[in-house]
Each structure stands twice: as C-alpha cells, then as structure tokens.
Amino acid sequence: MTIKDIARESGYAVGTVSRVINNNPNVSDAARARIMEVIERYNFQPNSNAKHLKQQGSHGVAMIVKGTSNLLLASILERAQALCDEAGYPSSIYYIDEDDNEVSRARQICREHKPNGILFFGSDTHNFEGDLSELDIPCLLMTNMAADSRAANLSSVTVDDSGAASRMIDYLYAKGHRTIGLIGGVLRCSHPSGARLAGCLSSFTRLGLPFEAARQYAATRYTLEGGYRGMEQLLKSCPGLTAVFAYSDIMAVGAIRALRDHGLRVPEDVSVVGFDGLELTEYLSPRLTTIRQPVDRLAERGVNILIHCIEQNPGAVHEIVPFEFLERDSVRDLTQS
C-alpha cells in the first residue's frame, strides 16, 4: 500500500493525502476523515525516510528554471507551484541563465537550503550524465526525458517529442509540402530539439523527402529573436522552401515576423507551424497550427511523481504524456493549387 493507493481508494488527490499524513491543517474535515479511514483500514505506515528528511530541516521543493522567456515552462511552473503548496511542500524558484549548469546550481541549493526534492525546467540533459548521488534527494526533469540516465534519483515527465514532430511532418507532406525548413535549438544543448529532429528525419526518410541539415535546419535559442534569426537563415540557405516547422510557438511567432519583414505572406507564400500549444497562438493572424503540450497534465504528473519519490523512495519514474495536434490556419494546402 502506497500513498498513491490511498489516494485511489479514498477518491482524493495524492497532494490531499500527503497533507493529511503530514498533519497539514489545510484539509477539509470530510477529506481528512475519509483518508484517515482508509489509512486505518489498511494499517498504512508512511515512509520513515520522508519523515526523517523533514525532521532534519528539509524545506519543500526547489524549482530550477533555465531562462526566463519560455512561456510554456512559465505556465507549467505556475501550476506546479500551486500543486506543491497544496501537497504541503512549499516551493522555491531559482532562475538561471540558459548557459549555466543546473546540476552545479542544484548542489549549491542542496547545501544551503536542504530541499526535499528538485524540479528542473528547461534543462540540458547532458549536464545530468555524471553522478547525481551527491544531491541525495529525488529530482525530476520537466519536459525532458531522462530514461537513459544512470541516476536512480532522476525521474522525468515529457511528451513524445519525436512522435509529435513526425506527426507534424506527415501533416505538411499531406498538404503537398516537399521542401520543409526546421528552426530548433542547438542540438548538443537541447534534448527536445534532438528528439524532434529525430522524429522529422524519420518522416523524411519514410516519405522519401531529401533533407540537408546545413540548408534546412537553423539552430538558435527558443526565443522570439531566435525564431526571427532562424527564419532569416533559412531564407538564405533554402530559398525554395514552402513550409517551416519551428520547435516552439515563440520561435514560430518570430519566424512569421521575419517572413513579413521580407514581404512574404503566411500561409500564402510560406506555411509556418509550431510546437507547445500556447494560448496566444489562437489569437495570431493566421492562427497557428501547432502541437499542444498539456500544461496541467505535465505539472500534475511531475509533481505527483516527485512527491511519491520523496515519500516512498521507489526509484526513478519516467512517464510520457499524450500530445495534441491542433490544425488551424497557418498552412497552405498545396494539393489544392
């Protein structure tokens, strides 16, 4: 019997069960009574390691965020904060530059503040290839997969980046596009970019489409300016392209601005698609076709997995949540031309 089983049996969220176990007063009398009934029926004994951590002065969950311009991460972060607070694990947020090493920062935070666990947002998975035992607490990568990591204390939650990218290329192909440019992150620093490129390459190969990375892939930052500069690079290196797949919606917005500054229309001259499903994409002109990452689901699973690891110590957990394909107005159907 685990805290997750108690939650399922009682009908309440894991966070609510956690608050009852930890004597947090922010729980209704009805919820407390129902959860305590289940706990007593099964003679549930909370994991002593988690209690020991708290007795030694550990403090909530540390959230380390790389960069400040990623709106998707900001949305997940806001939801994750609320969930941690509800579960009785107050959060502290630490912003670092995109070029900083988050693992080094985590070591410093552990020494100075002794958190129960760490959530990493926008991380470079290469920084996690070494030994994480020094951290000695559960950690989780949000929107990055860490299943290949040797670290027993590093979990992860993400969408299927490769599958989503492949789905987008298949869609563009079905709309008649044969020369497609890509705007993504620097591959040695961005695991999602690598996974999305792998998905694109899989579709290119299966569909028999030629692809030259030097001409068709622009590596840049996940920012408005990055999308703008990436689009300008593609216009020079691949002048015959009919569609552009930006690996984030923010990049896509920058790319659309660049196209318009060069006198080109979207989608009449060049089609543009994105990735993330930010709310703002529904209010663009044209509305952006994109892949939606489920913000609430990512936050809920990430926080629940981390708290479960804190309280039950089951070892690393890796989960892929479903993405959603949103077809809108930013792609021209060349098969109708």
Image (cartoon, helix red, strand yellow):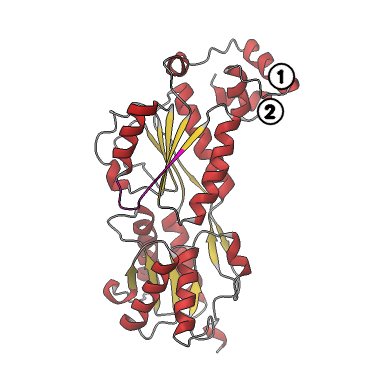
Residue 181 in sight in this render: no
- Taking the magenta stretch, the answer to whether it contains residue 330 is no
Q: Considering the image in quadrants, where does the C terminus appear? A: bottom right
From this view, report whether residue 263 is shown above or below residue 68: below
Amino acid type, label 2: Gly
x and y, in percent, of residue 325 in the image: 56, 62
Quadrant in the picture for residue 317: top left
Q: Residue furthest front?
A: 112
The magenta segment is 93-100
**Residue in the picture at 28% in, 38% down:** 104
From this view, report whether residue 246 is shown above or below residue 266: above
Q: What separation in Å lies between label 2 and label 1 (alpha carbons)?
A: 9 Å
**Residue in the picture at 46% in, 71% down:** 254
Judging depth in this view, the residue of 233 and 148 nearest the camera is 233
From this view, report whether residue 89 is shown above or below residue 180: above
Q: Which residue is mark 1?
A: 34
From this view, report whether residue 199 is shown above or below residue 145: below
Amino acid type, label 1: Arg
Q: Which residue is mark 2?
A: 11
Q: Considering the image in quadrants, where does the N terminus appear? A: top right
- Taking the magenta stretch, the answer to whether it contains residue 95 is yes
x and y, in percent, of residue 215 in the image: 30, 77
Q: Which mark is residue 284?
A: none
Residue 224 in sight in this render: yes
Q: Earlier in the sequence, mark 2 or mark 1?
A: 2
x and y, in percent, of residue 102 in the image: 33, 42
- In-image side of 66 versus 16 (left or right): left
Find out whether the residues at labels 2 and 1 contact each other: C-beta distance under 8 Å: yes
Q: Element under label 2? A: loop
Q: Residue furthest right?
A: 30
